[in-house]
Image (cartoon, coloured by chain):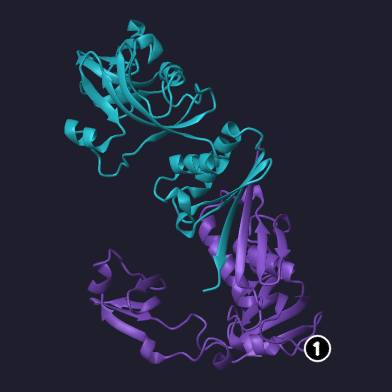
Chain colours: A cyan, B purple
Amino acid sequence: MPLKDGDFVLLDYTLRVKETDQVIDTTREEVAKEVGIYRADKTYEPMLVVIGAGWVPRGLEERLKEMEVGEEKVIELPPEEAYGPRDPRKVITMPARRLSQRGIVPRVGQRVRIEGLGVGVVRAVGSGRVTIDFNHPLAGRTLIYEVALKAKIEEPAEKVRALIKRRIGLVPPEKFEVEVGEKEITIKMPEEAFYIDGIQVLKRGIASDIMRFLEGVELVRFVEEFKKS
Amino acid sequence: MPLKDGDFVLLDYTLRVKETDQVIDTTREEVAKEVGIYRADKTYEPMLVVIGAGWVPRGLEERLKEMEVGEEKVIELPPEEAYGPRDPRKVITMPARRLSQRGIVPRVGQRVRIEGLGVGVVRAVGSGRVTIDFNHPLAGRTLIYEVALKAKIEEPAEKVRALIKRRIGLVPPEKFEVEVGEKEITIKMPEEAFYIDGIQVLKRGIASDIMRFLEGVELVRFVEEFKKS
């Protein structure tokens, strides 16, 4: 059965740039270690993708729709289906003053944020002028995804837990008690999530994700209980 | 009917030091303005006192127990019933170095905190030595409270709202929906309280107050609802 927009899947993937053969992202610990991009603070496990959410390139979402759970595939995405072609007009030369005013001393390779233009990479510095490339770092690149569609999530409570996990990585998702009503979802928070930095904003994000991706849900309720010790 | 430990009352008061006739605290806006201690960021209204909680001097609590709702009284508390006698041994002379090590340049009248000794007031500075008084500022003083016992709170839901208000002054307490169960209290939070700085710690404090002062309550539940916009 093919996948469709709104489906929740768990995906293992390794992303490589075709032109350089460089691995730039992976959900697989052994691959990360092999190519030297392993980070101890990251959890390596299949990642939640909601088809159509735009969390991965649209081209990848379209190819996933043709896959079955359990299937592995190598997907090649030309720039048009990934981060677009490189646009030479986004390579901009400006007075170095525009950076020095903000206390930035530009060096080649440095990432800088310029208001109204976004984030770019310094390509050249010289004689009072600096050239910055505001193209997406993957623009113009052909991407190769080695994907394995590990699972499809069907149960609403499991969907909710997957959305919680995406925002609150530090607490095991099974510690959140999820109750599914007709138009509402109730989430009982575990005590270890009470004092997470920015937890109130995370709750708002989770509530908004749930109401976006779970059809018919109009209310998300968080419950926190304090007991007499 | 006399009051007893655990009773919730709302109290208007003006606190004066007998020896100096100085008003140092009041719940009455006109008094605060008259004596020049008015602060625009403070709300002037009767204050919650739970008898026996220790939020006001024990001596004052004992005198309140003899009062009736609606009664006004002038209560004189000698030091023994207020902040104790002055203890000359708490006036300590130490090398000025002990302050300068912490980057403090002591001036007479300045309040300083010294680890292990608490907060004191600098009384004298000279020839490499400094004298600090660690007595409570009201130690040795006779206090005069002009009190008016405005109301007694009987309903558990109103008690809960009064305890909420004590910690969350910025949101009108009537915006918190309170449900009283046999052994549990459920508080539905208004959206304007969701993002208050430190709200999670405030919730814990409120829960702990409720379980301390409302007999039989073993669980406090906070509920926050996000609705589809």
- In the picture, the quarter occupied by the C terminus of chain B is top right
Residue B118 located left or right of residue A144: right
Q: Quadrant of residue B11?
A: bottom right
Residue A176 image position (x, y, % from top left): 51, 52
Q: Residue at x 70, y 86 (%)?
A: B64
Q: Residue at x 28, y 63 (%)?
A: B103
In the rendered structure, which amino acid carries the disc numbered 1?
A: Met
Residue A106 seen by the camera: no
Residue B13 seen by the camera: yes
Q: Nearer the viewer, residue B169 or B22?
A: B169
What residue is pinned by disc 1? B1
Residue B74 image position (x, y, % from top left): 72, 86
Q: Nearer the viewer, residue A50 or B55?
A: A50
Determine whether B146 is above or below B159 in the image: below
Residue A181 located left or right of residue A94: right
Residue B225 located left or right of residue B127: right
- In the picture, the quarter occupied by the N terminus of chain B is bottom right
Q: Residue at x 79, y 85 (%)?
A: B68
- Chain ID, mark 1: B
Mark 1 Cα within 10 Å, few/some/many (few <14, many 20+)?
Answer: few
Residue A66 image position (x, y, % from top left): 45, 18
